Image: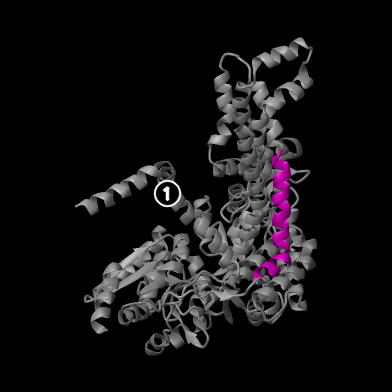
Amino acid sequence: MAVTDTGTQSKQSWLKRNKLTVTPWVFLAPALCFFAIYVVIPIFESLWLSLYEWNGLYDADGNSTAVWVGFDNYVKLWGDPKFWTSLVNNVIWLVMFMLAVPAGLFIALFLNQSVPGMRLYKSLFFFPFVISQVVVGLIFGWFYNPDFGVVGSLWKAVYCEETVNIVGNLTFRCSAPVPDILSSETWATYGIILAGLWPQIAYCMILYLTGLNNVASDQIEAARLDGAKGWKMLWYVVLPQLRPATFIAVVVTVIGALRSFDMVAIMTGGGPGEGSTNVLAYYMYETAISEYGERYGYGSAIATVLFAIMLVYISYFLHRMYQDEKGGH
Amino acid sequence: MRSILTPVAALAVAASGAAAGDLVINFDDLNPGPKQGFEDAVELFKSENPDINVIVNINDREAHKTAIRNFLTADAPDVTSWYPGNRMAPFVDAGLFQPVDDVWEENGFNEDLAAIKPTMSRDGKIWGVPYSYYQWGVYYRKDIFDKLELAEPTTWDELIAACGTMKEAGVTPFTIGTKFLWTAAGVFDYINLRTNGYDVHNDLTAGKIKYTDERIVQTFKNWEQMIGECGFVDNHASMSWQDAIAPFSNGDAAMYVMGNFAVDGFINAGLTEEQIDFFQFPEITPGMARAEEAPADAFFIPANAKNVEDAKKFLAFVARADVQSQWNKTIGQLPVNAKSEISDNKFIQEGFATVSTAAGLAQFYDRDAPAAMAKAGMEGFQKFMIDPSTMMEVLERLDEVQAEVYE
């Protein structure tokens, strides 16, 4: 009796003594578990897979048909022009996408006034961020369509005349061919980025709008008394107070640019020609999972490179967050 | 050992919902016509074999392409539909299909299905049984041809001359939509088959000939001539094959290099059967034996099939002449069995005349070449069609891909 009593007592007291240390882990456990299964383990699996050549098939007995090739996939990647095109396109995305930050800021400044119905305008500006990227891609695809899109219709209005063709149906004769943005190796990427910018600007705008709510009005007033206005007011008084919003806006924009995938998939499928609008994420999908792909090892190697690029950036981001937290305490 | 294994095996069978006497068939077309054709055939098979309990799973075509990669290992049916040529190669190489030479031997398919036999074979064995195929060729607006007093061209020069007449009349000779790439491969295949013949097509897709080989360069030069002197609709890279029907039905373009499945699309776009007609892709190199594209659909037996005996019965059944006649009448395609009858639809009649007299049957570039090569090749074709001056650049790139894919 006495022995069991002390036993349970000491157990209880251990739990009680360490309650503060244990509780957070108990609460974290489910999340950690899922994070491990769906994020951490797959990362290592795909790192491992990138050292194999594999078409994704198992034989009749359920054994993988993968063949070990070491760093062969990475060597191939180095000499693969489609990989470099994708990488360059990712950089173009990154640079162009940064326009979303100032654009979002200016729309936010513009909308940050008390006019009747302003909530409605704000919602309308925010609207593109709410709808799915796939839908945005589709809409812009139609928008650019040389036959029935806005671009085509405007062009036809200026450069084409309506005539009757050989079987008596209406048709157009154009003095210059209608620009086909998504079929041009030079312009297609920019066309897609423009579509991507639309929701991204809305996202940055909403970040800045919330940021503007927290701008201290006494500082604005003080600055105004000191004679600051216009650009100077913005640059020296408002923007410094918006630093946290700017930081988040840049972060989400960089991530948005690096993981661009759905727009490319829906608007061009990586085309025209030899993957001229490919980005790393889509090229990975194309080589590994798509109908003409089924090269899982090579796809994993691309994923690994993309992961490495993101890692550099994410480490910097985490480092900053950590520094801020430390500073805050 | 035995006592342990038997319950496990029984469990495995129960898990897939099949018992002895069950025949599980996975089919991959949910479109009304093909589905009907398949279901009718299954009904007939059931009435002929009342002791076999047939279980049918019909999936969407694209979903099937993904699903087959798993179910062949994890939960294999007894029969599955799939494609011959290089499309079956990964599964054959992984040992996921079983050879069916005996079915061919016992039922005389070696004679009746002779034309398709090379495509169904790999490593000296036959891996499946085809139930249907369809022809490719040039579909054209007969009313436009009549207006311009043009006859169906039979040679390259006649085609080029006809194109000239069309252009003068303000008609774009060819329509095409290359957004999803494979349509361009159809044009390439035909120019290549007519320029260099069937063996060069096979050697190219088997990786035995380089793309910068002078014969392939000649194919591209002919293609360049076709783009220059005939010409395709503008903006083809932003159109799917269905989108490309619009200029054809509107009368802006007069010809379309396509497979027979497109006829439905033409009719749905408002054209009547009198307005459209078909001719075989014209001869380029005089005297070259005429080979055709005729992609086939087939049935295969997975290596993990549980009821192989009945599966083979079903395979023998689907290739039978009378079954193929009825099935293909329903789906509007061509029976593969030479002894089958065909419907009196004019495109089917012409298609049968085209395919049954061909010196060789190609499966289509993306089925004859391995996936990675096919993808790169078709991208190159599209790039070349947008800007023919990139010809050598494209071909050199394809050589690089080829060296990598077939290493």
Residue A295 x, y percent position in the rendering: 58, 68
* Quadrant assignment, res A103: top right
The answer to which of A198 and A164 lies nearer the viewer is A198
Q: In which quarter of the image is the C terminus of chain A?
A: top right
Q: Position of residue B332 (x, y in %)?
A: 44, 65
Given the current orientation, which residue lies at the most extreme left position? A1
Q: Which colour scheme is used?
A: one colour
Q: Residue at x 32, y 49 (%)?
A: A11
Name the foreground residue: A148 vs A42. A42
Is A79 positioned to the left or the right of B45 in the image? right
Q: Where is residue A320 in the image (x, y as percent from the top left)?
A: 66, 41
Residue on which the image places disc 1: A29
Kindly identify the residue that appears in the image at 39 percent across and 67 percent down: B27
Question: Residue A188, image x and y in percent?
Answer: 70, 48
Q: Can residue A136 be seen in this view?
A: yes
Find numbered disc 1 in the image and state the secondary structure of the residue it sits on.
helix
Name the amino acid type tagged 1. Ala
Does B224 appear above or below B94?
A: above
In percent of the image, x 71 and y 27: which residue is there? A240
The answer to whether B346 appears left or right of A189 in the picture is left
Q: In the depicted view, which residue is nearer to us: A13 or A289?
A: A13
Main SS class of the magenta portion in the image: helix
Query: Residue under mark 1: which chain is it in?
Result: A
**The magenta stretch spans which residues?**
A73-98
Left or right? Give the position of A312 relative to B293.
right
User: Label 1 neighbourhood size at 10 Å, few (<14), some (14-19), many (20+)?
Assistant: few
Q: Is residue A270 visible?
A: no
Measured along the vertical axis of the image, is residue A100 above or below residue A176? above
User: Is residue A84 highlighted in magenta?
Assistant: yes
A179 and A275: which is toward the camera? A275
For residue B107, above or below residue A91? below
